[in-house]
Amino acid sequence: MEDLPESVDRHILDHRIVLALKAIMDASGRTLHEAIDIFGVRYEELRRDRPDDFQVSREEYRRGVCT
C-alpha cells in the first residue's frame, strides 16, 4: 500500500467515506475510481489489523453505499 496520510485511516475508521476518498485523491493525485480501489484495500487492511478501532460494524459500514 502506498504511503497515505494518517487522516485517511482516521476517516475510514470513523466511517467518513467521502472524506477518506478525497484525502486519498489529494495525497496521491489519483482519480476517483482509483481512490475507490485504494480505499477498498486500506479498509480491508484496517479491518484485519485494527478491528476494534472501527465505529460501526462491517454491515453498518456498507449500508447506503453504492459503488
Image (spheres, rainbow, N blue to C red):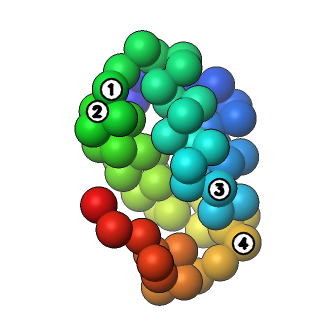
Q: Are marks 1 and 2 in contact (CB under 8 Å)?
A: yes
Sequence-earlier tag: 4 or 2: 2
Q: Is residue 4 left or right of residue 5?
A: left
Disc 1/disc 2 C-alpha distance (Å): 5 Å
Disc 4/disc 1 C-alpha distance (Å): 27 Å
Sequence-earlier tag: 4 or 3: 3
Check the image and report above or below for 19 versus 43: above
Q: Are marks 4 and 2 in contact (CB under 8 Å)?
A: no
Pointer 4 residue: 55
15 or 9, which is in the foreground? 15
Disc 1/disc 3 C-alpha distance (Å): 18 Å
Check the image and report above or below for 40 versus 63: above
As helix, strand or loop, the secondary structure at mark 2 comes to helix
Sequence-earlier tag: 4 or 1: 1
Q: Is residue 55 left or right of residue 1?
A: right
Residue type, numbered disc 2:
Glu
Question: Mark 1 or 2, which is nearer the eye?
Answer: 1
- Marker disc for residue 31: 1
Sequence-earlier tag: 2 or 3: 3
Horizontal and vertical percent position of residue 20: 58, 43
Residue type, numbered disc 4:
Gln
Pointer 3 residue: 16
Specify few, some or many for label 2: CA neighbours under 10 Å numbering under 14, 14-19, or 20 or more.
some
- Marker disc for residue 59: none
Question: Mark 4 or 3, which is nearer the eye?
Answer: 3
Residue type, numbered disc 1:
Thr
